[in-house]
Amino acid sequence: MVYQGLIEKYKDFLPVNNRTPIISLYEGNTPLIPANNLLKKLRFDGKIYFKFEGMNPTGSFKDRGMTIAVSKAVENGSKAVICASTGNTAASAAAYAAKAGIQCVVLIPEGKIAMGKLSQAVIHGAEVLSVDGNFDETLNLVRELSGQYPVTLVNSINPFRIDGQKTAAYEICESLGQSPDYQFMPVGNAGNITAYWKGYKEYAEAEPKKYSLPKMMGFQASGSAPLVEGYPILNPETIATAIRIGNPVSWKYAEEARDESGGIIDKVTDDEILNAYTLIAETEGIFCEPASAASIAGLIKCIRHEYFDKLNPVKIVCILTGHGLKDPDTVLANAVKLKKIKSVKADIKDIISAVEL
Ligand code: AN7
């Protein structure tokens, strides 16, 4: 059958029924790409795959949760959705609300979201409120608002979001025909690590002979690493604005995923993130956003610290949560610094003196 989005495909595993109007942009079914050039570069004896979630309709994994959150909102008679967002949730909520024909209100931390994400929220017709505060403060506001007014909250506190996002774990299991040994991913508000862990557990329970449980390896940016420090960060900072979050809502579930799986949650610096971001763009031809590169930076850190047993080659999946085109500013700011763009005259001689052909 032709693919029609993840609710249609996984409805037996999802909280939907015949009366649920399916609001879908045919999200999910994203590629699992072997990263063989990276393997060579890192001289790593194992397998690395990227789950490229940037290939979802609005360019991030948020679409997996939003298809169900918005479908259920419409089923329950809601005429409006609201969220706080570092950008991707807002872009996704705006698109799915547009498809559903309902109102969408998004609150974003002023000046701290990538241009691509902001332009998505605007073009899909969301009401965009730029709040002079950080993500955590903004989330508190929308929680309060949705408790008092007839508007459905579509942040990952909404359990339907987690159910939609867990389908990425199903897809990985199906693509590999088994579970990976390790999964590396960025952690911000910690909804996604919660969702993947739920998905892996469900598949391992349903078919224990075929599927087992991967170790969950989460990475935060070092200026926004509450789960690593063990306390909320009041003024989180990082170039990876998507994960600039100081007090994750799913804190407890992220710790559960880490501890039950025997994984870790660690931090990586902005420099490590940018290096990993550039490295996979240059060696693998994949452009992810800075937050997504935290998973690769984490993997590189683990390999450097000889985390893996050399005698036992492992199978690793890195989740690339969002597309690089969301945030071209970060590339260009660094390209200019690195003098990667040269100015030339409209003249052959000038051009060949600038590049070797
Ligand atoms: C690309 O859009 O929180 O740990 O408001 O956009 O589930 O929060 C985005 C988070 C990773 C972290 N990668 O996921 C929002 C928002 C990208 C992201 C995360 C986000 P969670």
Image: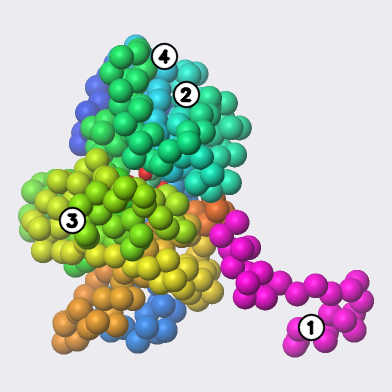
Q: Residue at left 42%, top 66%?
A: 270
Q: Earlier in the sequence, mark 4 or mark 2?
A: 4
The residue identified by callout 2 is 104
Q: CA distance from mark 1 to mark 3?
A: 51 Å
Is disc 3 surrounded by few (<14), some (14 to 19) or many (20+) residues within 10 Å? Answer: few
The residue identified by callout 3 is 230
Apparent side of residue 174 relative to residue 42 in the rendered image (left or right) = left
Q: CA distance from mark 2 to mark 3?
A: 34 Å
The one of 27 and 347 positioned closer to us in this rendering: 347
Q: Earlier in the sequence, mark 1 or mark 3?
A: 3
Q: CA distance from mark 4 to mark 1?
A: 57 Å
Label at residue 354: 1
x%, y% of residue 286?
50, 65
Label at residue 156: none
Q: Is 132 covered by the magenta stretch?
A: no
Is disc 1 surrounded by few (<14), some (14 to 19) or many (20+) residues within 10 Å? Answer: few
